[in-house]
Amino acid sequence: MGGSTGATRRRDGRTGRDQRGAAAVELALVLPILLLLVFGIIAYGYMLSFRGSMSQAAAEGAREAAVNVNAADRETAAMRAVDDALRAYGVSCGDPGMSCDYRLVEATADCATQCAVVDLSYDYDAHPLIPLPFVDAVMPDTISYGASARTS
C-alpha cells in the first residue's frame, strides 16, 4: 500500500483541503456583505427608535411648558423635559446638530387659545448616532418633530 498524505481523495479527485480552501474564499466574499447588512439593520433600527423618542420629547416639552404656572419658567421647563427624554441617546438641545425651539402662539386653527409649541430638528446626515459607511444612503438627512399643547 502507498503512503498516506493526510488528505483523503474524493470521487471528483479533490481533497478535503481543497474544499476547506473554497469555503474560506466563499466566506471572505460573503462576510463583508452580510456584516454590512446586519449592522445596517441595527443602525436603521436605532435611528427609528431615535425618531420615536424625538416625537415623544417634543410632546413632553410642550406639555411641560403648558402646565407650568410660572410663564417665565416655561421655556426652561420645556427644554429640560426634551433633554430628559433624549438622554438615553446622549443628545441634548445644546449639542451640534440638534435644534430645539420653544414659542408661545396665540389662537390659531390648531389651538383655540394660547399654546406652547416645541419644534425639534436633528441633522442626522452630519451627526449620525451610529456612523457606518454606505449606510448613510438610506438614512434621513434631518429628523424634525413638533408638538403643541394648550396652556392652562
Image (cartoon, rainbow, N blue to C red):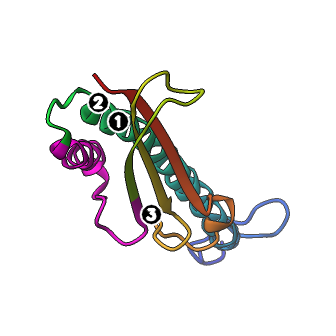
- Quadrant location of residue 74? top left
Q: Is residue 55 left or right of residue 31?
A: left
Q: Are marks 2 and 1 in contact (CB under 8 Å)?
A: yes
Question: What residue is rendered at 50% in x and 55% in y?
Answer: 43
Q: Residue 29 at x, y = what percent?
A: 69, 71
Q: For label 2, count other residues whose C-alpha is less than 10 Å away and answer few (under 14), some (14-19) or many (20+).
A: many
For this orientation, the residue located farthest to the right is 12
Q: Residue 25 at x, y = what percent?
A: 68, 74
- The three-letter code of the residue at mark 1 reads Ala
Question: What residue is rendered at 32% in x and 27% in y?
Answer: 151
Q: Is residue 32 left or right of residue 67?
A: right
Q: Residue 44 at x, y = what percent?
A: 55, 51
Residue at image mark 3: 130
Q: CA distance from mark 1 to mark 3?
A: 28 Å
Q: Which tag is nearer the camera, tag 3 or tag 2?
A: 2
Q: Residue 83 at x, y = what percent?
A: 25, 50
- The three-letter code of the residue at mark 3 reads Ile
Residue at image mark 1: 62
Q: Is residue 23 left or right of residue 79?
A: right
Q: Are marks 1 and 3 in contact (CB under 8 Å)?
A: no
Q: CA distance from mark 2 to mark 1?
A: 6 Å
Is the N terminus in the top left, top right, bottom left or bottom right quadrant?
Answer: bottom right
Residue at image mark 2: 66
Q: Is residue 29 magenta?
A: no
Magenta-drawn segment: 72-99
Q: CA distance from mark 3 to mark 2?
A: 34 Å
